[in-house]
Image (tube, rainbow, N blue to C red):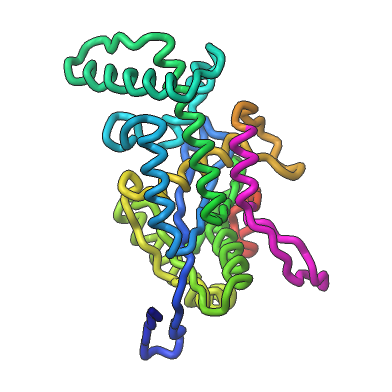
Amino acid sequence: MTTRFLVSSSLVPVYTWSMSYLLFLDESGLDQRHSPYEVLAGVAIRDQHLWDLVCQVREAELEYFGRRLSDGDLELKAKKLLKRKTFRLAAQAPPISTSERKDLTVRCLEKGDSARGRQAESGVTRQELTALAQTKLAFVEQLLELCGRHSIRTFASIVSASAPRPAGHFLRKDYAYLFERFYYFLEDQRLDELGLVIFDELERSQCHLLTEQMALYFRETAKGRLRAGRIIPEPFFVHSELTTAIQIADLVAYIVCWGVRFGSAMVEPRREELESLADLVCQLRVRTTREIMGRPDHPIWSFTFIDDLRPREER
């Protein structure tokens, strides 16, 4: 079925399409203290593939943990699944067989639930903690492999912690660069495919500000008006704990922040234990080419590093 948006203003394009890409966005490293970089990450998936991915992620949760993660204290959040302690606990014993690991993991989670209800010590064993940690890492690896099977593509703007910040209220460069890469990706798809942008819900005032900044960018700048032909200028906001794809974007943002390094400018150390997961995330990147400064095949990747967020006129 074709969906059609009709508007009267000549400044707004008329959209007609049969399929679209959904770009789910989340951030990592906003504390600017403990994180090496500030990352805006996105995962793009065709609308027709989304529900199948969600169902398979839920099946993987049951397969690995014996429950939906959102049903207990453990969430599908990178800071809980991939913190340093997880790797330390996972490495304190050889790999446990899949069936035994699941049994131990279920017991560990049940003991934790019971202890919270009684406000008492959980009594979990070393072996159960090891199994849970190994399960977390195996699950994240499986999740990224599912993303590959569903042709998810990852995007990221990686900002130096020392990057000068803009004084104005225009759309920040990390957002603009990510939208640029998403636009190039959409250009390489079918002519009738559009992109919808979906954010993890922020504080209400921040949601309003971001919506206004996006509207200004897509309406008042030449590049923005061009890209509005492919990207719907008004974003959607959802609750991350209720939206599987936002949780995947959170994992990608965290892994990029702590594990992905490229070029000579990214000098902050990375967590070596994240290398294999970082490789899986990088396999989901997009590479395209465009004519830039007379070079017709200039390579452009969907991950970009930014060391100055100010617009040219503020530098």
User: Can residue 78 be seen by looking at this rendering?
Assistant: yes
The x, y position of residue 231, in whole percent, is 49, 71
Residue 224 colored in magenta in the image: no
Question: In the displayed structure, would residue 213 be above or below residue 254?
Answer: below
* Point 41% across, 59% down: residue: 198
Q: Position of residue 154 (x, y in %)?
A: 56, 53
Residue at x 44%, y 66% (from the top left corner): 196
Image x and y of residue 32, in percent: 51, 37
Where is residue 247? Give x, y as percent. Answer: 41, 45
Residue nearest the viewer, comparing 75 with 177: 75
Residue nearest the viewer, comparing 2 with 171: 2
Q: Nearer the viewer, residue 113 or 128?
A: 128
Q: Nearer the viewer, residue 105 or 248?
A: 105
Q: Residue at x 42, y 30 (%)?
A: 80
Judged left or right of residue 253, residue 2 is left
Q: Which residues are magenta?
A: 275-303
Indicate whether 12 appears above or below 287: below
Does residue 168 appear in the picture of this structure? no
